[in-house]
Image: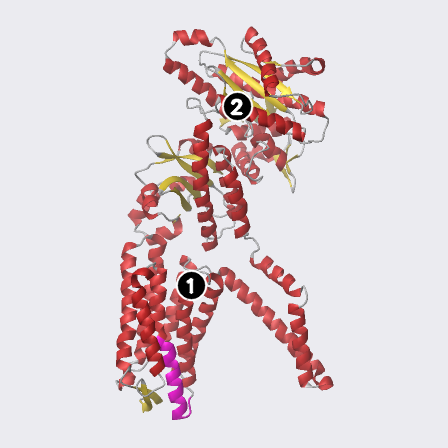
Amino acid sequence: MTYYALSALINGITSTFLGIFVYFRKRQVAASRRFCTFLLAIAFWSYSYFIWQFSNSEATALFWCRMLMRGSIFIPITFAHFVVVWLNLYKENKKIIIWGYICSLVFFIFDFTPLFVKEVFPVISFKYWPRAGVLYLPFLFFWFGYVVYSWYLLVMSYQKSTGIKRNQIRYILIGTMIGFLGGATNYPLWYNIPVLPFGNILVALAIAIIAYAIIRYRLMDIEIVVNKTVLFGLLIGSIFVLHLSIITLLKDTISYVGATGLSLGLIIFLLFFTPFRRKLGGFVDALIYRGKYDYQKVLKESTKALVSILDLRQLLCYVVNTISETVGVEKISLFLREGIRSRYQIKASCGLDEELVENYVLKPNEGIIPWLKQSKVVFIKEEMERALPGKVFESIYGDLVKIGAEFVLPLFYKDNLVGVLNLSNKQSGGIYNQTDIDILESLGAEAAVAIENARLHTEVITDELTELYQPRYFELRLREEIEKAKRYRHCLSLMMIEVDNFEEFKKGYEQEKKDKLLKSIAGIISKNLRMADIACRCGENGFGIILPEITEDPGGNIRERLKKQIRETVEIGERLRRRVKEEELGVTVSIGIASFDGQDRDMNREIMIKQAKEALTLAKREGNMVKVFYDEKLKKEISTEVLEWIKETEEVLVSGEICVDLVKHTVQVKGKPIKLTPKAFDLLCLLMKKKGRVLNRSFLTESIWGYEYFGTTRTVDSHIKCLRQKLGPEGKKIETVKGVGYKFVDEG
């Protein structure tokens, strides 16, 4: 086999395999179909070229020379078609492409005439080489014209592009220049110019460069196609072995034809008339998508949830936890535009230090934000670091390393950058492939709309001063929660809070001071509630909190569950009362609590508010107290226990080197204070209070985040991981119970 035959064969094989991969992975994308057509033309030219090299007669050589030209005729126009579609320039170049196909068709028709390929003749080391007809020169002008024009479009787009697209264009441009110039070394000999077609092998090199661009820069994601091709190749091989085995065993018994027919019949029956094909498909998919996620399923479930969540806080937590669970990242943060200065602040996160979450902001006029607004594409650190000049990259990326930002996704709503989602490296260590980008961009688009809807909803139902829900919304939600408690036999508590001696406070201070006071108390309330609790402003100096039941055993004794519900509500009330006092705001608060066991069918909103206000009146009479409303039966059962519960809330939780002060809301390890988020603090307290007991993830999620929480139990795992890190060696006391949850033990 000569060098020219071997190079043609290599060109054909490389273009064939790349074409198959791209077609089966992205055949629904127009640019991918055009790219496959381009590779098909190269493959046809290459295989015909290969066969031509073995021609043993003038007629055979002339036939295969004309056949290879049929492939060559369509190479430039299919390449140009791919370029204009890929660069989104088809509309502007539609006529050029149509005329290109018309010219190609004309050359195709005349290909098997002497006007195009006149004859074959011996030249240098070739026994049969084609001689050009009169139409061949116009063809060469056509061939080079469309190739050069395509390069011109790529160069123009390269100058305007940034990031990933710029790198993709660069590799396509370099690869096709090498390939076309290498292939063009065939043309001089057509006019008896003594230049050998030494550049043929460069076509394969060009295809290799394009394949590199596909894999490295996600021009087209072919990873799954490669896996599928290998698996189905093994399947076909297995079928072939089965076929040969049957023929070998039976050919002497029932003849070769009979054995062949029986084998083919058995294979067809297995593949098309039994569950074998369906089970095989499921097995192949399980192998291919092992460790990945179902793209359509995730999108469907997420879209359904996003359109139904109107609470902004729950929505953001859902977005963060869904993406964290789906993609599998170590750190994730969601920034939203806030305030008059339009700074972007972290509103939801996972795996980040709390001090960083509170203080880290993205400024609107520097760093990554202007770049995202202009480019409107994802920012992938690894790729941008290679694509952008050093100083340019540093000015854009800035100190995003603090939050572990490897993948930055802009969230746009009507051309407004409403938020930024930052993801760290995958826990698996894998790269962000095209499937990841597709699903994240889809989720990001849905999330941006959902965030704006939730913001509008929140603005309508939220008190402007305190940022808690308005009184009207409080009444509506209380009615809904009472009905829900009746339906599911859940307990429900209502807490009414009022500022003591507020009238005297008003007389001594200006309106601004009064507003600041109410805002401070509202902030304390927001930071010390569970995710499911609903805090509202009620009146000029009052607040109402609806506290649904969170239980490990919804089918347990209702009276015991009610007592537990009251106890937890009292603990929350005491914590709030003390927080306000500790802040030294110049006032105290009194709290009244009413609870409902879900059994009383006559309970309604008015009755529950009345009961809570009765307890509040008693609390205000004594001043800065927490009081509970009792019916006669409840009073006999737990009135004395409530005093003990209040007393217990003043105690300090201690285990070895860990000391938790429930009054001051502080945690110390070996005498040194550590800073925990409210959720992490509540999680640690819950684990320590239920020391030795195994608490499943669902219970922990409901207890800390609420039973209406839309996220996954993965957020518990993330908080436990952070909690262990904060506690240092003492973190070993939080033990994992595989497949269930966690428990706290005195000895780690």
Work out which quarter of the rendered image holds the C terminus and state it.
top right
Residue at left 53%, top 51%? 296
Q: Is residue 70 magenta?
A: yes
Looking at the picture, how far across and down is residue 194, in whole percent?
A: 27, 85
Residue bearing the label numbered 1: 32
- Labelled disc at residue 284: none
Q: Tell whether 560 sits left or right of 377.
A: right
Q: Nearer the viewer, residue 17 or 282?
A: 282
Residue 493 x/y as whole percent: 61, 22
Q: Amino acid at mark 1?
A: Ser
| Dot 1 alpha-carbon crowd within 10 angstroms: few under 14, some 14 to 19, many 20 or more | many
Residue sitting farthest toward the bottom: 57
Q: Is residue 598 in the magenta section?
A: no
Query: Where is 487 relative to 394, above or below?
Result: above
Q: Amino acid at mark 2?
A: Phe
- Magenta stretch in the rendered image: 55-73
Q: Nearer the viewer, residue 554 or 537?
A: 537
